[in-house]
Image (cartoon, helix red, strand yellow):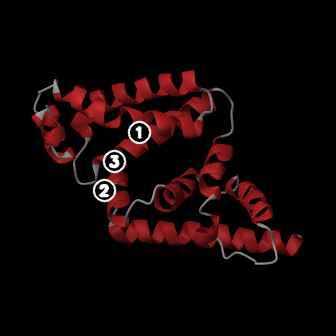
Amino acid sequence: MSNPSDKLSDEELVLRMKSGEHRYFSVFVDRYEKHIFNKCRSYVKDQDVAADLSQEVLIKVFTQLSKFRQEAKLTTWLFSIIHNTCIDYLRSKKKSPHEVITEKLADEVFDIVDHDEEISEEKTVEILESLLEQMTPEGKMILLLKYKEKHSIQDIQQSLGLSESAVKMRLKRAKETINKLYGEQLKKK
């Protein structure tokens, strides 16, 4: 027999949790625990570390829920918590978050850069890795949200607390920056 709370939309679930009905947090956990773990696992390859980071994310969601303004989708807000938690972990372990972000963006490289057909995909990804080292964290995150996570402009806008035009401008600048760097890199080859 299905539980009626399983039919709640994310918005209804958040409203109930925010109003102090903490039992609905278990519904949230049931709904998103696997998703959170898989996202953490994409940043860190160790299953135990991913499980620990997933727990940390769940704690942050529970403690920061009052700050969620519900202007963005819950999944966009959740992604930013997962992303920041994992990047903080990687920094604390002196691992390069650039590598992880590069791997996550590698699949989407042809949507981001004006690809030269004569250069192999492997070489393009290798070039992208070095270029991401030169990007700002904000530029990398906006590219990741848009091209890897496939979030809409409106979701990114709400999640980052920016206007729609600011998100579009930052995305445009990030793409221009990476394309400029990519073009310069190709001239060196």
The image shows residue 58 at horizontal and vertical percentages of 36, 28
Q: Is residue 64 in view from this perspective?
A: no
Q: Nearer the viewer, residue 40 or 177?
A: 40
Disc 2 crowd, CA 10 A, few/some/many (<14, 14-19, 20+): some
Residue at figure coordinates x 63%, y 41% from the top left:
97
Q: Which residue is mark 1?
A: 35
Q: Amino acid at mark 3?
A: Thr
Quarter of image, res 4: top left
Residue at figure coordinates x 75%, y 55% from the top left:
130
Q: Amino acid at mark 2?
A: Gln
Secondary structure category for the residue under label 1: helix
Residue at figure coordinates x 68%, y 45% from the top left:
99
Q: Amino acid at mark 1?
A: His
Q: Which residue is mark 2?
A: 158
Tell me which label, 3 or 1, sits earlier in the chain. Answer: 1
Tell me which label, 2 or 3, sits earlier in the chain. Answer: 3
Left or right, 116 with reference to 162 = right
Q: Which mark is residue 127?
A: none
Tell me which label, 2 or 1, sits earlier in the chain. Answer: 1
The alpha-carbon separation of the residues under discs 3 and 1 comes to 10 Å
Quarter of image, res 183: bottom right
Q: Which mark is residue 75?
A: 3
Q: How many marks?
A: 3
